[in-house]
Image (cartoon, helix red, strand yellow):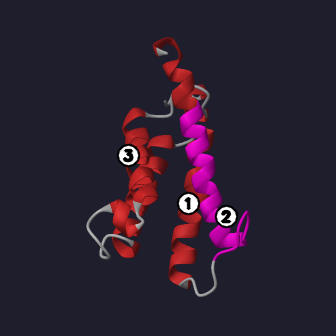
Protein backbone atom coordinates (compact mmCIF):
# COMPACT_ATOMS: atom_id res chain seq x y z
CA UNK A 1 0.00 0.00 0.00
CA UNK A 2 2.95 2.37 0.46
CA UNK A 3 3.01 3.42 -3.21
CA UNK A 4 -0.59 4.63 -2.78
CA UNK A 5 -0.06 6.53 0.47
CA UNK A 6 -0.42 10.01 -1.09
CA UNK A 7 -3.70 9.05 -2.77
CA UNK A 8 -5.09 7.35 0.33
CA UNK A 9 -4.17 10.39 2.44
CA UNK A 10 -5.89 12.70 -0.08
CA UNK A 11 -9.06 10.58 -0.03
CA UNK A 12 -9.02 10.58 3.79
CA UNK A 13 -8.54 14.39 3.92
CA UNK A 14 -11.37 14.97 1.44
CA UNK A 15 -13.83 12.60 3.13
CA UNK A 16 -13.10 13.85 6.65
CA UNK A 17 -13.47 17.44 5.45
CA UNK A 18 -16.82 16.70 3.78
CA UNK A 19 -18.13 14.83 6.83
CA UNK A 20 -17.11 17.70 9.10
CA UNK A 21 -18.67 20.22 6.74
CA UNK A 22 -21.97 18.31 6.95
CA UNK A 23 -21.96 18.80 10.75
CA UNK A 24 -21.68 22.54 10.23
CA UNK A 25 -24.38 22.59 7.55
CA UNK A 26 -26.69 20.71 9.91
CA UNK A 27 -26.20 23.43 12.50
CA UNK A 28 -26.56 26.34 10.07
CA UNK A 29 -29.17 25.27 7.51
CA UNK A 30 -30.60 21.99 8.83
CA UNK A 31 -29.10 19.85 6.06
CA UNK A 32 -28.53 16.90 5.80
CA UNK A 33 -30.10 16.51 9.25
CA UNK A 34 -31.74 19.29 11.27
CA UNK A 35 -30.26 20.26 14.61
CA UNK A 36 -32.12 18.91 17.63
CA UNK A 37 -34.58 21.29 19.28
CA UNK A 38 -33.10 23.31 22.09
CA UNK A 39 -29.53 23.43 20.79
CA UNK A 40 -27.85 26.50 22.33
CA UNK A 41 -27.64 29.31 19.75
CA UNK A 42 -24.10 30.15 20.85
CA UNK A 43 -22.98 26.64 19.90
CA UNK A 44 -24.91 26.65 16.63
CA UNK A 45 -23.56 30.02 15.47
CA UNK A 46 -19.99 29.58 16.67
CA UNK A 47 -19.36 25.91 15.87
CA UNK A 48 -21.50 25.81 12.71
CA UNK A 49 -19.37 28.19 10.62
CA UNK A 50 -16.10 26.65 11.81
CA UNK A 51 -17.35 23.19 10.85
CA UNK A 52 -18.92 24.20 7.53
CA UNK A 53 -16.15 26.50 6.30
CA UNK A 54 -13.29 24.58 7.90
CA UNK A 55 -14.55 21.27 6.53
CA UNK A 56 -14.93 22.75 3.04
CA UNK A 57 -11.41 24.22 3.15
CA UNK A 58 -9.94 20.91 4.34
CA UNK A 59 -11.81 18.94 1.66
CA UNK A 60 -10.65 21.36 -1.04
CA UNK A 61 -7.15 21.45 0.40
CA UNK A 62 -7.14 25.25 0.62
CA UNK A 63 -5.36 26.89 3.57
CA UNK A 64 -5.39 23.34 4.87
CA UNK A 65 -2.95 23.62 7.75
CA UNK A 66 -4.70 26.63 9.31
CA UNK A 67 -8.19 25.28 8.71
CA UNK A 68 -7.28 21.91 10.22
CA UNK A 69 -5.61 23.55 13.21
CA UNK A 70 -8.69 25.66 13.96
CA UNK A 71 -11.00 22.65 13.51
CA UNK A 72 -8.79 20.56 15.80
CA UNK A 73 -9.02 23.22 18.50
CA UNK A 74 -12.77 23.49 18.09
CA UNK A 75 -13.10 19.74 18.58
CA UNK A 76 -10.95 19.86 21.71
CA UNK A 77 -13.21 22.56 23.13
CA UNK A 78 -16.33 20.65 22.05
CA UNK A 79 -15.06 17.50 23.75
CA UNK A 80 -14.55 19.24 27.10
CA UNK A 81 -17.80 21.20 26.87
CA UNK A 82 -20.06 18.31 25.90
CA UNK A 83 -18.32 15.07 26.92
CA UNK A 84 -15.19 15.34 29.05
CA UNK A 85 -16.91 16.42 32.22
CA UNK A 86 -19.37 13.47 32.18
CA UNK A 87 -16.76 10.71 32.50
CA UNK A 88 -13.04 10.41 31.87
CA UNK A 89 -13.11 7.88 28.99
CA UNK A 90 -14.47 8.81 25.54
CA UNK A 91 -16.17 5.41 25.14
CA UNK A 92 -18.12 6.14 28.32
CA UNK A 93 -18.94 9.81 27.72
CA UNK A 94 -19.80 9.55 23.99
CA UNK A 95 -16.93 11.73 22.87
CA UNK A 96 -15.13 9.32 20.53
CA UNK A 97 -15.91 11.31 17.39
CA UNK A 98 -14.79 14.60 18.94
CA UNK A 99 -11.47 13.02 19.97
CA UNK A 100 -11.04 11.36 16.59
CA UNK A 101 -11.78 14.57 14.66
CA UNK A 102 -9.48 16.53 16.97
CA UNK A 103 -6.48 14.29 16.34
CA UNK A 104 -7.14 13.69 12.63
CA UNK A 105 -7.28 17.45 12.14
CA UNK A 106 -4.12 17.90 14.21
CA UNK A 107 -2.38 15.36 11.94
CA UNK A 108 -3.66 17.14 8.81
CA UNK A 109 -2.40 20.46 10.22
CA UNK A 110 1.05 18.96 10.71
CA UNK A 111 1.17 16.98 7.43
CA UNK A 112 -0.35 19.54 5.09
CA UNK A 113 -2.76 19.20 2.19
CA UNK A 114 -0.87 16.70 0.08
CA UNK A 115 -1.89 15.87 -3.48
CA UNK A 116 -5.26 16.68 -5.07
CA UNK A 117 -5.47 19.99 -3.22
CA UNK A 118 -5.71 23.68 -3.98
CA UNK A 119 -2.65 24.22 -1.78
CA UNK A 120 -0.59 21.83 -3.94
CA UNK A 121 -1.74 23.52 -7.15
CA UNK A 122 -0.66 26.91 -5.81
CA UNK A 123 2.63 25.55 -4.46
CA UNK A 124 1.74 25.95 -0.78
CA UNK A 125 1.21 22.34 0.29
What secondary structure is found at the residue carrying circle 1?
A: helix
Q: How far apart in space, not on screen, are marks 2 and 1 (Cα)? A: 8 Å
**Is residue 77 shown to the viewer in this render?**
no
| Residue occupying the far left of the picture | 88
Q: Is residue 76 above or below residue 120?
A: below
**Which residue is pictured at 71% across the width and 67% down the height?**
33
Crowd class of label 3 (few under 14; some 14 to 19; many from 20; radius 10 Å): some
Q: Is residue 32 magenta?
A: yes
Residue sitting farthest toward the front: 92
**In the depicted structure, whether residue 101 falls above or below residue 64:** below
**Image height check: is 81 above or below 50?**
below
Across and down, in percent, residue 117 comes to 60, 32
Q: Which residue is mark 3?
A: 106
Residue 25: give its label.
2
Q: Residue at x 63, y 71 (%)?
A: 27
Do the residues under discs 2 and 1 have CB atoms within 8 angstroms?
yes
Residue 51, numbered circle: 1
Amino acid sequence: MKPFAPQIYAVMRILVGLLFMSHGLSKLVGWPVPMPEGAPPAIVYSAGPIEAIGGALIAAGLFTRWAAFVCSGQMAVAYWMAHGLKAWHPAVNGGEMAVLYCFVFLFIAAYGAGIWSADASRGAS
